[in-house]
Amino acid sequence: MTDSKRFRQAMGQFATGITVVSAWSKVNNDVKGMTVNAFMSLSLDPLLIAISLRNQAAFVDVLTETNQFGISVLADHQKDLSMIFSNQKQAEQPVDFDYLDQTPVIPNALVQIVCEKESEVVAGDHTIYIAKVKHLKTSEGDPLIFYGGQYRKLD
């Protein structure tokens, strides 16, 4: 039998990039964001991505109230931003955002994507959000990686 702790450790052996998902919150009248490593490309025709969020995450409420959100694939020098948006660290000053199609994204991220929510699938204690890519901007650099429960950089 496999328990959740062992499963989490096993899944930690799969290296992932780090993203920050961001959106304008109408309720709070400001930008909200969340670090997410459960992100993947889903389709080339149409261009679709998927993210998975724990159902109890506060950011689920933000995605409920909006149809458009940003995804920023973080560069190796943006570990602090990942930690801020995963509540591992307090921001010393407000986080700045770029806006692509009036949607907040992280400045200097490797990839900035604007997505329009297509559908949601509840799967266990998570919800998978499938979204259509509306805008995409890329930059040069190396990714921030998460592996074995730790942040890593490419050598």
Image (spheres, grey):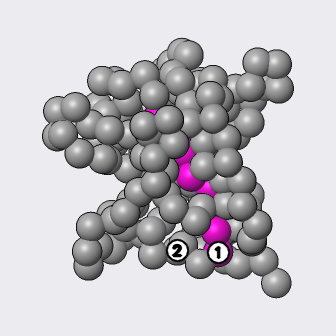
Q: Residue 107 placed where, x, y %?
A: 51, 62
Residue sitting at 67 percent across and 41 percent down?
136
Main SS class of the magenta portion in the image? strand
Tell me where residue 153 sits by quadrant.
bottom right
Q: Residue 82 placed where, x, y %?
A: 47, 65
Residue sitting at 70 percent across and 26 percent down?
48
62 left or right of 153?
A: left
Q: Closer to the camera, 22 or 51? A: 22
Residue 146 in view of the camera: no
Q: Closer to the camera, 127 or 33? A: 33
135 left or right of 128?
A: right
Q: Residue 68 placed where, x, y %?
A: 45, 28
Q: Which residues are magenta?
A: 69-76
For mark 2, give the secondary structure. Answer: helix
| Mark identifier at residue 79 | 2
Q: Closer to the camera, 154 or 13? A: 154
Residue sitting at 51 percent across and 42 percent down?
100
Q: Which residue is most to the bottom?
A: 155
- Whole-number angstrom distance, CA of label 1 to CA of label 2: 7 Å
User: Disc 1 designates what residue?
Assistant: 76
| Mark identifier at residue 113 | none
Tell me where residue 87 sits by quadrant.
bottom left
Q: Is residue 64 magenta?
A: no
Q: Amino acid at mark 1?
A: Asp
Q: Residue 88 placed where, x, y %?
A: 36, 70
22 left or right of 14?
A: left
In the rendered image, the vertical position of residue 114 relative to residue 45, given as above or below: below
Dot 1, crowdedness within 10 Å: few (<14), some or many (≥20)? many
Residue sitting at 82 percent across and 84 percent down?
155
